Image: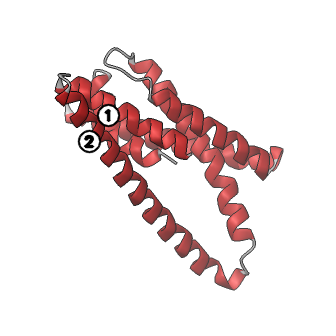
Amino acid sequence: TGINAVIYYSDKIFSLAGFTTPAQQTHATLLSVGLVNVLATLIAVAWVDRFGRKPLLFTGLVGMTIGLGLFTQIDLSTPYPLILGMHILLMVSLAAIFTPVFSLGLGAVPQHLYSHASSLLGALQQVAGAMGAALSVAVLTARSDSLVADGASNLAAYVGGMRWAFGLSAILS
């Protein structure tokens, strides 16, 4: 989904947004990811009842793709409120996706197998997340190295690599 890329690069994103100390960057990451995820999940649960699972899932997928696409536009002068807005869009979209996916996916499983299905779902998410993070890091590193070889500064090269990593995430979403 790209959330692993957002979390992995969040310290860098928030440092580029003006959070100078690691403590500030960690607080910004925890607050933005955690708070938005909790609020978005509560909203998504209410929306499932109101709109249904499929419309919520489709809306979440579109929002996620747009959010990841917007992250490809970050540069060294992107204002913090804009980055935060992109992050909120992505978190709300992910909550809109996960809520119906879990209920649709586990709804077909007999009740006595819920614990097994839930464990399998969690394991598959971890493996897919690790694969996505590894691919994103590989793309970021390759692009950054290429930009440094072409004469870009390390910071500009890192941002360029990050943009490509988010672009890949948007395409795969």
Residue 30: image x %, image y %?
Answer: 38, 41
Q: Are marks 1 and 2 in contact (CB under 8 Å)?
A: yes
Q: Nearer the viewer, residue 25 or 158?
A: 158
Side of 141 where 57 appears, left or right: right
Which residue carries the number 1 mark? 161
Residue 118: image x %, image y %?
Answer: 58, 72
Side of 45 where 138 appears, left or right: left
Side of 148 where 2 appears, left or right: right
SS at mark 1 in the image: helix
Residue found 70% across the figure and 49% down from its top: 45
Residue 24: image x %, image y %?
Answer: 26, 31
Q: Is residue 19 visible?
A: no
Q: Nearer the viewer, residue 156 or 102?
A: 156
- Residue 115 vs 82, above or below: the answer is below
Side of 81 where 26 appears, left or right: left
Residue found 17% across the figure and 22% down from its top: 151
- Residue 112 vs 36, above or below: the answer is below
SS at mark 2 in the image: helix
Query: Please, which residue is most extreme toward the front here?
Result: 150
Q: Nearer the viewer, residue 148 or 95?
A: 148
**Identity, as a three-letter code, of the amino acid under mark 1:** Gly
Which residue carries the number 2 mark? 141
